[in-house]
Amino acid sequence: MYDFHLHTTFSFDAKSSPKGVIKTAIEKNFKAICFTDHLDYDANIYYKDYDFDIDEYFKTMSELRDKYRDKIEVLIGAEFGVQPSLYEKYDKIAKAYPLDFVLLSIHTVEHHDLAKDGFPEKYEPLEVLKRYYGQMARCVKEFDDFDILGHIDYIDRYFKDKSRMPEFKDYRDYVAEVFENVIKKDKGIELNSAGRRRGLDYFHPKKEALELYYEMGGRVLTFGSDAHVEIDFGKNFDEVIEIAKSIGFKELCIYRNRQRDFVKI
Ligand SMILES: [Zn+2]
Ligand SMILES: [Zn+2]
């Protein structure tokens, strides 16, 4: 199996050591893993940067990649927290470093860190989702240097009162606009198992959204646990595979040197 969304102590909010993750992955018989530590600039209302020393990251990760080469394939990626004001910054990083894989994630909308700054409470629920998916569609359309769009319904986690969450049919069009751009640009989305660990009873995206992606012709899909601690590595992947297969997906994607390969599931 393959886990293409993993955090380590290079991320401001993660506790897993890179070596610990690799050892866990070997124990669980994974064929390849990809580290995707956080680069989030201007991430909240105080314009805080959540980043790390990228040279140090590559030094550490490539040493480990070489050390464990015979046991597992270790790939080096990043999760870019994209906003319209940051395209150039991320373009420069993507060009300057030999990343295997880039996740585009929307963690911040209108300078509000979705996890902390109470954005879902700022407007009526449908207006919240319109602004969130609107920014996502815009970033996918305007920013090119990514491979996969991360955890598309991440915002659901941060509705304090889950009963305010509209039904999928009521905001399906916003999500469809995102997928339309993803598919047009030949990018993909991920099936991220973290939702269940973050107060939701589904993975990201929820099944209806994944079905919509498939119906619209989307076939590019990665699997990620989004683990921030070692015990969450590769979590619930049996169910992830089952859901993907039940919708019709026959392959998942892996990336090396920003090049995509399809692998049977
Ligand atoms: Zn994320
Ligand atoms: Zn993540």
Image (tube, helix red, strand yellow):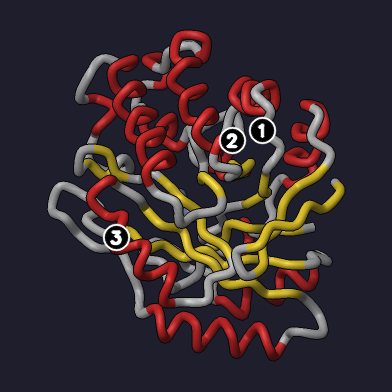
Query: What x and y, as percent, mark residue 29?
Result: 83, 66
> Residue at point 39% right, 29% down?
133
Q: Residue furthest front?
A: 184
The answer to whether mark 2 is within 8 Å of ligand 1 is no
The residue type indicated by label 1 comes to Gly
> Residue 227 sits in which quadrant?
bottom right
> Residue at point 47% right, 65% down?
37
In the drawing, what numbered circle is on residue 183? 2
Q: Residues within 10 Å of mark 3 (few under 14, many from 20)?
A: few
Query: What x and y, as percent, mark residue 230?
Result: 60, 65
> Residue 247 sits in which quadrant?
top right
Residue topped by disc 1: 218
The residue type indicated by label 3 comes to Glu
Q: Give the side of residue 149 with respect to residue 43, left or right.
A: right
Q: Nearer the viewer, residue 126 or 203?
A: 126
Residue topped by disc 3: 88
Q: Residues within 10 Å of mark 2 (few under 14, many from 20)?
A: some
Against 192, is 233 above or below?
Answer: below
